[in-house]
Image: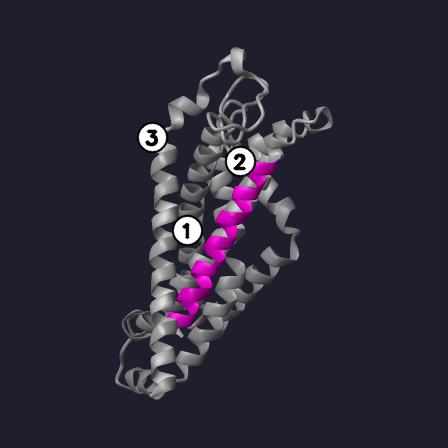
Amino acid sequence: MRWIDERKKALMFQYLFLFSAVLILAAIVISGEALWEDALKTDFTRRNRLPCPAYPFGTDWMGRDVFLRTICGLSLSIRIGFLTAAMSAGIAFIMGMLASMGKWADGIVRMVIDWMMGIPHMLLLVLISFAAGKGLSGVIAGISLTHWTSLARLVRGEALQLKEAPYLKISKQLGVRRLRAAIRHMTPHLLPQVFVGGILLFPHAILHEASITFLGFGLSPEQPAIGIILSESMKYLAMGKWWLSLFPGLLLVLVVMLFYQLGKNLQILFG
């Protein structure tokens, strides 16, 4: 009985954490949308102010509120992370399903995965973003097309294992087509894994979005993106403007860790 009570407490804690994490992330996204115009405002009368009650993260060299810019940057990163993680998970699911269609299909899928994983990740991300025209569309394309490989290998292995299940072999003998059997019988088993895998892709997507915008392949410089904020702050660190990079970088790490723990909790619950 004690073991059952402890397990119930653990499950309640995990559900509470999931609810709190989703609430915090939703609040950041909504706040970023609402504060977007204020984050772009400049006021040279308040430039380079230290953190204070009026400006918790201080102001930058143009008098912009670093707190507002950070919230808007995180909101943008979460939205990009959600979109790119969903697209990557979709590609991984399709690849995993294709691998179960036969040896020739599995061979092609393995070849594509090995080819993608053989190229340095950041280099491939930059090349795709550049080829897609930089900007927001380039960032989304670059992240979406480079983050599916690890999840695809996992889904492929699960799909090949399910392919040997007795009920799928029986359906094949009854004349059910492979694609129909895969969609009808394998999809319900694979979707939870794809969903959790997509959540676990969020931290990578957010960090790579910040990296690509830090390198200048993302949005225009005036936009409040975390990568742009950190990139611009590097010029002023030697002048003692430590708050320009400390708080945005710290909040970025906290959001990434929150997504990571969210994915781990979902993995435990679905497991």
- First in sequence: mark 1 vs mark 3: 3
Tell me which secondary structure the magenta stretch mostly adopts: helix
Q: Earlier in the sequence, mark 2 or mark 1?
A: 1
- For disc 3, the neighbor class at 10 Å (few under 14, some 14 to 19, many from 20) is few
Q: Write the start and end of the magenta stretch as one range.
A: 246-270
Disc 3 residue type? Ala
What's the CA distance linking mark 2 and mark 1? 22 Å
Give the residue at mark 2.
Answer: 226
User: Do tag 1 and tag 3 residues touch (Cβ < 8 Å)?
Assistant: no
Q: Position of residue 154 (x, y in %)?
A: 49, 69
| Percent position of residue 160, x then y | 45, 77
Query: Please, what secondary structure does the residue beneath circle 1 have?
Result: helix
Vertical order, 102 against 230 (above or below): below
Q: Which residue is mark 3?
A: 34
Q: Position of residue 76 (x, y in %)?
A: 43, 37
Amino acid marked by disc 1: Met
Q: Of the residues shown, which amino acid type is indicated by label 2?
A: Ile
The mark that comes first in sequence, 2 or 3, is: 3
Q: Closest to the observer: 177 or 198?
A: 198
Res 87 label: 1
Asked whether residue 191 appears in the rendered view, the answer is no
What colour scheme has been applied to the protein in the rendered image?
A: one colour
Q: Secondary structure at mark 2?
A: helix
Question: Which residue is depicted at the point 54% across and 27% down?
Answer: 58
At a point 31% along the width and 82% down the height, the residue shown is 172
Residue 130 as seen in the image, left or right of residue 97? right
C-alpha gap between disc 2 and disc 3: 17 Å
Residue at the limit of the structure toward the top, as seen here: 45
Look at discs 1 and 3 and give the one toward the viewer.
Answer: 3
Q: Quadrant of the C terminus?
A: bottom left
